[in-house]
Amino acid sequence: MQPHTQGIKRAVQEAKRASLLLEKGEFDWSEWIGDQSQVSGPPVGELAARYEQWFFATKGETASTRYTWEKDYLAVYRKIPNDAHLTEAFIISLIQASSEPNTRSRKRYTQALKKLAEFAELPIRMKKIQQLSGNYGRPGTLKPRKLLTDQEIIEIWSLLDNPIAKYMWGLMACFGCRSHEVWLVDTSALLEERDELPGEPGIYFVLDQQNITHYIGMSANIQKRWFSHYRQADFNEIESTRILYIPGLPKHYLREIESFLIKSFLPSLNIKGKPIELNRIDRV
């Protein structure tokens, strides 16, 4: 076979492969334009600053988006020298050196650096970067966790001497929120005087002024006896919060929740970030 005939045959094969990838929705130009590992854009410091402006311009700046930016993006960018340039090789080496495979940290590094490279429109093979993310959080990969029993939750609470720790533990026990979520919850709307709670069962959703959910109270399995442990001290009045009442939780639990929150220590914890500031209780 002549050289030019071999070239034509290979071209036909590649064209067929490209056509098949297009049909399957898997075509990626970066796989057809050669090694772009040395291509770079602006320095990371400049690029991250521009990306931050775009991030809040498109998503809005709230307590939730600010928390997401600082925890999932800025925490990664701060560990890169401001004068460094993004290349495929640099991104891969940074991800591998800074995190263990199949961990939340690895997923965070991969996402933050991939998003930054995409924002800069760098011709980097994004699929190759994404593959480093691993299987953290994917269906079928989660391992069962041993949960505390109701009695263990109460016993641990009784051993805590710090009132802030007691308050946070109570919120997590009663509402099922995560440890980092309690910093974003402002419970002061429960200070409002009203004759009775809504009659239907439900759970609490805390929303901001743009109706963005910041906290969902997963309270379906609340044990009524827990709340007798939390009726402690008085508190200082603070900003009010808008709380939506959602069907799903028995009415007598809601009364106990309100009593617990009203008599808890430090109803607004303004240590990390700005608390959500809202103003009324609504029904949905």
Image (cartoon, rainbow, N blue to C red):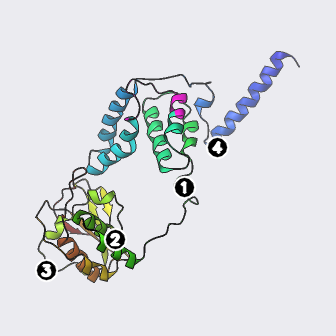
Picture quadrant of residue 55 = top left
Marks 4 and 1 sit apart, C-alpha to C-alpha, by 23 Å
Alpha carbon distance from label 1 to label 3? 46 Å
Chain-order first, disc 3 or disc 4: 4
Earlier residue among tags 1 and 3? 1
Residue 160 higher or lower than 256, as above or below: above
Q: Identify the disc placed on residue 195.
A: 3
User: Quadrant of the rendered structure where residue 259 is?
Assistant: bottom left
Vertical order, 114 against 172 (above or below) = above
Dot 2 amino acid type: Ala
Q: Quadrant of residue 256?
A: bottom left
Classify residue 214 as left or right of residue 258.
Answer: right
Q: Residue at x 23, y 79 (%)?
A: 255
Q: Residues within 10 Å of mark 1 (few under 14, many from 20)?
A: few
Badge 2: how crowded within 10 Å, few (<14), some, or many (20+)? many
The location of residue 186, given as percent across then percent down, is: 21, 61
Q: Which mark is residue 24?
A: 4
Nearer the camera: disc 1 or disc 2: 2
- Give the magenta range: 78-93
Q: CA distance from mark 1 to mark 2?
A: 26 Å
Q: CA distance from mark 2 to mark 3?
A: 27 Å
Residue 228 spot, x, y in % from top left: 25, 81
x 24%, y 56%: residue: 208
Tag 2 and tag 3, C-beta contact below 8 Å: no
21 sits left or right of 215 in the view: right
Please say whether residue 90 is one of the residues in the magenta stretch: yes
Identity of the amino acid at label 4? Lys
Q: CA distance from mark 2 to mark 4?
A: 47 Å
